[in-house]
Image (cartoon, rainbow, N blue to C red):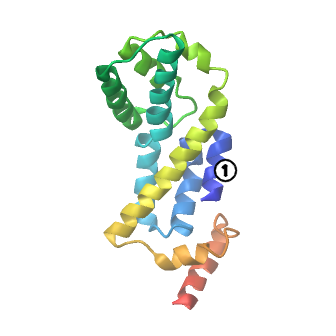
Amino acid sequence: MWPVFSLGFVTRSSMGVMPVTERVTERAMGVPSEYASFAIPLGATTKMDGCASVYPAIASIFVAQFYGIDLTLTQYLLIIFVSVIGSAATAGTTGATVMLTLTLSTLGLPLAGVGLLLAIEPIIDMGRTAVNVTGQSLAATIVAKRAGIWDKDTWDAAEDGIAGILDPESAEDAEDAALVRS
């Protein structure tokens, strides 16, 4: 997962990393191409737990504490609801300011709180995107394994190193190595 994690970290875009995520998921994680070509784009558009779920929730609590506003149980439940819905509705592009603004306005918190976080937004976004793309690949792998279509030999061959995973010509070599192992 290192190529996906690191590229997601520096690009801050789940959509921009999607081809690499798909290739690594197929060639290192053992997910069949037919399933990965469906699951990874779906995950890149709907599975934004870092950008749309975790960050707005924590940032909303921070903003409330910064302004000395005590949140009620209802507001905490609203944070959970907006975070879950938002993680399925956020685009796979850089930044999560839209979701943070939506969460703050839903809770009735000052929107000026967004300005407090803009200075550190790019740094935090790097980590969020790395979490998103890693989770997209992991979810596809878990579902493939539970569905019985996961290729353990590809997984085992990838444990020996990632050198040839992104090279199209060496994918055939990895498949040959998996056949030799079995």
Question: Can you tell which quarter of the image residue 169 is in?
Answer: bottom right
* Residue 142 or residue 73, whichever sits in front: 73
Q: Mark 1 points at which residue?
A: 6
Q: Can residue 13 be seen in this snapshot?
A: no
* Amino acid type, residue under disc 1 in the picture: Ser
Against 21, residue 56 (above or below) is above
Q: Give residue 77's position: percent from left, percent from top.
A: 31, 27
Residue 78 falls left or right of residue 160? left
Please rate how many residues cluster around mark 1, counting C-alpha atoms within 10 Å: few if below 14, some from 14 to 19, many from 20: some
Q: Is mark 1 on a helix, strand or loop?
A: helix
Question: Can you tell which quarter of the image residue 168 is in?
Answer: bottom right
> How many numbered marks have been drawn onto this rendered protein structure?
1
Q: Which residue lies furthest to the left in this view?
A: 74
Question: Which part of the image, by quadrant, shows the N terminus?
Answer: bottom right
Against 115, residue 140 (above or below) is below
Q: Give residue 36's position: percent from left, percent from top.
A: 45, 60
Which residue is pictured at 47% across the width and 22% down the height? Answer: 60
Residue 66 falls left or right of residue 164? left
Which residue is pictured at 66% across the width and 74% down the height? Answer: 170
